[in-house]
Image: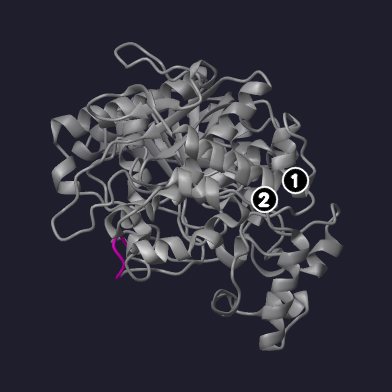
Amino acid sequence: MMHKALPLRRALALALLATSACATAQSGNGAANASATPLAGPVETQQGLVQGAPGKLAGVTVFKGIPFAAPPVGDLRWAQPAPPAAWNGVRDGTKWGNACVQPPAPSRFPPNSATDMPDSPPMSEDCLYLNIWTPAKSAGEKLPVMVWLYGGAYNEGGGNAPFSEGDNLAKKGVVLVTFNYRVGPFGFFSHPELTAQSPHKASGNQALGDAIAAFKWLKQNVAAFGGDPDNITIFGESAGAAMDAGLVGAPPARGTFERAISESGAWMGLGIALMPTREASEQRTLEAAEKIGKSSLAELRALPAEEVAKNFRGQGMIVDGYIIPQDLSITFAEGKQNPVDVLVGSNADEGSFTRGFGPPTTLESWNKGADMRWGGLTALGEAAYPASTDEEASAQASKPFSDTMAWHMRLFAESQAKIGQKAWLYWFTHEPPYDEGRADLGAGHTAEIPYVFDNLAAPRTYPAGSSVEKMAGNPREEAFADQVSQYWVNFARTGNPNGEGLPQWPSVTALEPDQAMLLDADDSGKGMWLNRAKSALYDAMYEERVAKPLGIQSGE
């Protein structure tokens, strides 16, 4: 709610700021740059005034560290987000808000981009902040809004990651937003006392609640930054993509966004499976709490954040009973999900990063693992992934990971098309260059992100660490990044990725069962997707492992 006592103070703050800017303009070049910024003055939100700064590209203004919810600390640890407090004066919007508590990974390649960069902010439970890049010259321009949900296995990430900086997308005519949601045991935590205290008798999925709070804040405030509150597109990758799909199916999220993009993940996660339940998550919490002798909610809330992070694991997106009231495979099968347009897909080599896990695959080990992989569907599995040599077995080993995800993404697109929404399916087949000495993961997990953000010069995110040096400034790679990012922007603007100068992208309803829109630097367009044998395998797997246990009737 807008703070009733603030207008006079805001007016005084604006007057003082204008006087200061005028004086500075007479004294040097710094003010000349500020005066050239489209939104040079403070922007008024419902909580107070915030001052941004020029972005990295001319004509873009950046506002960092704006609180969209109250700090989830003390008695608010593990609570669903509460409204943000108002502030007096002009808030400094030139610095990142705190990153959410999570495990750093400075020695990994790529490192944790939210915590291990030179300008990474400190970590804290007080971390519910968002960032806005806008090309608007004034409020009310009604530009499409794109809101990024980061990946990171529900365990890491932040809106400050350099790969997701929004200057280049904003320059294409959108208001780009990143935000922090709680991760690990702070964002995905169920406990019987939390459930009992909840008016909805639910607990868990705090991170999804954070996302809904961010979307609602934007509905109320983004017009002041030049955005259209009635044209919000959420987009995310991996865990963020799964959350996107979860939010498409979540009743409390209805009306908070109009479109969704999911890159490499949907409501079943990265595969085909039942969603975890709140009851099972509560049991895991109690088992972990018993080991440290602190089982009550009060005792757990009194623990330092470091102890929570050390002793508990995030439980991921679950059927919590409120945000996700039932397994979303039922929701989507029955056509009860939110009526939003979607653009979804995955990468051809999603599973390539798993090649280094465990011993090399041989024909013998591949054949021995058939029952574990396929269960009663072994004959279909062997038909889909034939191998007669060690080399063939090794080549097949990571493909089921990739293909399962591709099948899931098509199910998502087709589910939205069935309820009359615009739906678009892609398969990212482009293989970016990798530096010598680094694993060549092909079109691996996260490989599309630099192209989506048109940020080829930014540090990469785990695991597909493609080459900055070989991509930034490379005409072929830059042209492809411009193409992919323009598709995403076009979809956010109209619900249709197509536009002048772009290869034609057919809707999912115009594709044959073994076709998808292939995204590739040399030949984007409709092309071959999974073959019929693989589709038959995953159809049967879904029926056996999801549909039958949930009572979903064929054809729903």
Q: How many numbered marks, from 0 up? A: 2
* The C terminus: image quadrant: top right
Q: Residue at x 35, y 24 (%)?
A: 486
Residue shown at 50% from the left, 58% from the top: 153
Cβ atoms under marks 2 and 1 closer than 8 Å: yes
Q: Position of residue 540 (x, y in %)?
A: 62, 42
Which quarter of the figure has residue 539? top right
Q: How is the image coloured?
A: one colour
Q: Position of residue 443 (x, y in %)?
A: 31, 43
Q: Residue type at mark 1? A: Lys
Query: Circle 1 is placed at which residue position?
Result: 548
Considering only vertical position in the picture, is 295 above or below 526? Answer: below
Identified by mark 2, the residue type is Arg
User: What range of the chain is rendered magenta?
Assistant: 107-112
Residue occupied by mark 2: 545
Instruction: Using the image, determine if residue 128 lies above or below residue 334.
Output: below
Disc 1 on helix, strand or loop? helix
- Label 1 Cα crowd, 10 Å radius (few <14 / some 14-19 / many 20+): few
Badge 2 crowding class, 10 Å Cα cut-off, few under 14, some 14 to 19, many 20 or more, is few
Horizontal side, residue 202 vs residue 7: left or right = right
Residue at point 64%, 61% (across, down): 188
Q: CA distance from mark 2 to mark 1?
A: 7 Å
